[in-house]
Image: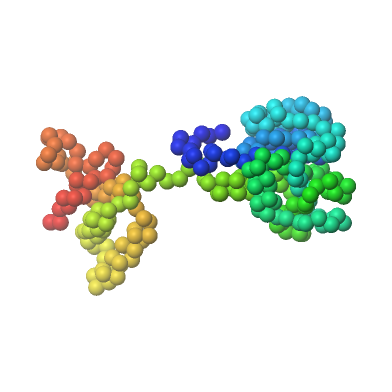
Amino acid sequence: MTRNANIRDEALSVDVRPPAVILCEPQLGENIGTAARAMANFGLTDLRIVNPRDGWPSEKARAAASRADHVIDKVQVFDSVEAAIADLTFVYATTARSREVAKPVRGPDEAAATVVPLGAKGMATGYLFGRERWGLNNEEVALADEILTLPVDPNFASLNIAQAVLVCAYEWRKTATAGALPFALDVDANPPAAKDDILRLFEHLEGALDRVSFFRPVERRPHIVRNIRNIFQKATLTDHEVKTLRGIIAALEGRPTRPRKDQPDGARRVSEDGAGEEAAREDDHE
């Protein structure tokens, strides 16, 4: 997994007990592994398996988990759904089909809104998932507190187990962290450009375009200039981006690399990062 260099604290601090994921009689080790990977993506670690067809442990499951070994290593295997959910306080039965069992039906976001507050109190909760071919039977659904279904197309409602786990885990973490993302733009390292620098960029660009007779017919120059400026204003440029654009314009102008007045002979006017800052601030408009 790629490590982020600057992870936000809001995304790391999840002081909520995650729900368990219970897979009822999964047939393929690969499906167990991909479900474990989906769980790990969103901070769930309690994976419970009821009567896996090919037994346990499973090297195929571990390989498909793509290094979610901390989930695979903690897997618990049970002989029945009743045993798998015995220590849980609240359980959702996931299904893509309407049932004869009279229970409230929730979407994944509504389920998360119920599970997260319970987890915040330290209560154990869980999501129960059915078999690959036909899901859960009515007796198993009856063991749950409520039904969870996804807003899928009713004409093509079947999801892979890992996909269903992923959606539920995503909604849980989004609710538990108030939607905190792992990283964001570092405004301190990328300050927005000052208006003065943006205006100098406009003058530099427009001067370069004048020299190549870009504005034709000449009487349309004010209109074209407004359009060009509007394009850059929409970009919300940073200080570094403005310097980079100035360097690009200077390079396209074919400027000689003359020494600056405050530098010894041979020093380049265009900075190493391509900004061309000093060259841009001392435009020649002969």
Q: Is residue 209 above or below residue 118?
A: below
Question: At which x and y percent is residue 187?
Answer: 37, 46
Residue extending farthest to the front is 121
- Residue that appears at 63% across and 43% down: 120
Quarter of the image that includes the C terminus: bottom left
Image quarter of the N terminus? top right
Tell which residue pokes out farthest to the bottom in this image. Answer: 219
Residue 113, how many percent across, how many down? 65, 51
Residue situated in front as seen by the camera: 9 or 3: 9
- Name above or below for residue 98 compared with residue 118: below
Q: In screen coordinates, is 100 left or right of 5?
A: right
> Can residue 248 be seen at all in this image of the molecule?
no
Q: Nearer the viewer, residue 213 or 6?
A: 6
Residue depicted at x 11% and y 41%: 261
Q: Residue at x 16, y 50 (%)?
A: 282
Q: Out of 44 and 286, give the one closest to the viewer.
A: 44
Residue 227 appears in view:
yes
Q: Where is residue 102 in the image (x, y as percent from the top left)?
A: 84, 57
Type of colouring: rainbow
Looking at the image, residue 184 sits to the left or right of residue 135; the answer is left
Q: Quadrant of residue 69?
A: top right
- Is 119 left, or right, of 138 in this rendering? left
Image label count: 0
Image point (38%, 56%), residue name: 235
Q: In which quarter of the image is residue 47?
A: top right
Give the quadrant of residue 121.
Answer: top right
x, y percentage for residue 103? 81, 55
